[in-house]
Image (cartoon, helix red, strand yellow):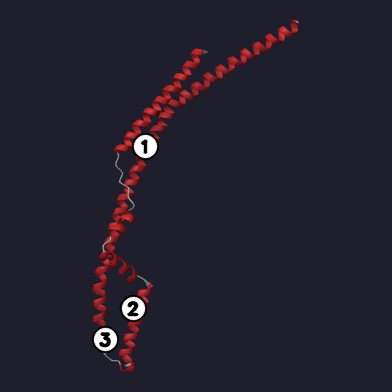
Amino acid sequence: MHYTLQHVDTLVQDDHKKLIKLDRRLAKTMAKAKFKITDVNDVMKHSLTVGEKIANAVARFGGSWTFIIIFLIILATWMILNGMQLFGIHFDKYPFILLNLFLSCVASIQAPIILMSQNRAADLDRMNAKNDYHVSLKSEQELRILHAKLDLLSREQMPHAILIAQIQLKMIGELQREVNELYHDIRELKGQR
């Protein structure tokens, strides 16, 4: 029985050593891998110039219902004041050439500002895609590590665990047999008195 316990102890220690060795190897692998994962929004927020902040604000306002409603009110007011000559105001006669010039100027200024904001959004998308790629690489590496550990468990440690369980069952059977013999011997001794 002593030999059997030594064998079980040896199996457990070997499995433990292999697991520690695998953990060290996998930790080295993770340490070698350089996964640069950043908070993209924080980087973008701190790297904005004044011009880029203005461009984002103009693009945000220019693409809102507030801008559209204000713009329509200004257009309607302009046309009504000049077309009907209300309050004696008539500085831009029909076909509203000054209004067309104003609209052209707004469009020519607003378009590049919106493009600047869209370029910034494209930069943000590129940074997010790069960050997602690094996260995916790290996840894949961690999955490989888990897979290696599961392989070790299924290939080496599970058969050892089954063998240890079989040895334990055998030892329990031997102990049970010895207890039964002792019980039987005690009953015989009581019967002889």
Q: Upstream in the sequence, badge 3 or badge 1?
A: 3
Mark 3 — residue? 96
Residue 163 location, x and y as percent?
A: 49, 21
Circle 1 sits in a helix, a strand or a loop, which is it?
helix
- CA distance separating discs 3 and 1: 70 Å
Mark 1 neighbour class, 10 Å CA radius: few under 14, some 14 to 19, many 20 or more: few
| Residue depicted at 46% across the width and 17% down the height | 7
Residue at x 68%, y 8% (from the top left corner) = 185
Q: Secondary structure at mark 2?
A: helix
- The residue tagged 1 is 144
Residue type at numbered disc 3: Phe
Residue assigned mark 2:
71
Look at the numbered disc 3 and give the secondary structure of its residue.
Answer: loop
The tag earlier along the polypeptide, 1 or 2, is 2
Residue lying furthest bottom: 88
The answer to whether residue 166 is above or below residue 114 is: above
Q: Closer to the camera, 84 or 26? A: 26
Query: Which residue sits at x=27%, y=83%?
Result: 99
Single out the mark in the foreground, 1 or 2. 2
The residues bearing labels 1 and 2 have C-alpha atoms spaced at a distance of 58 Å
- Image spot of residue 66 (x, y percent): 38, 74
- Please tell me the numbered disc located at residue 190: none
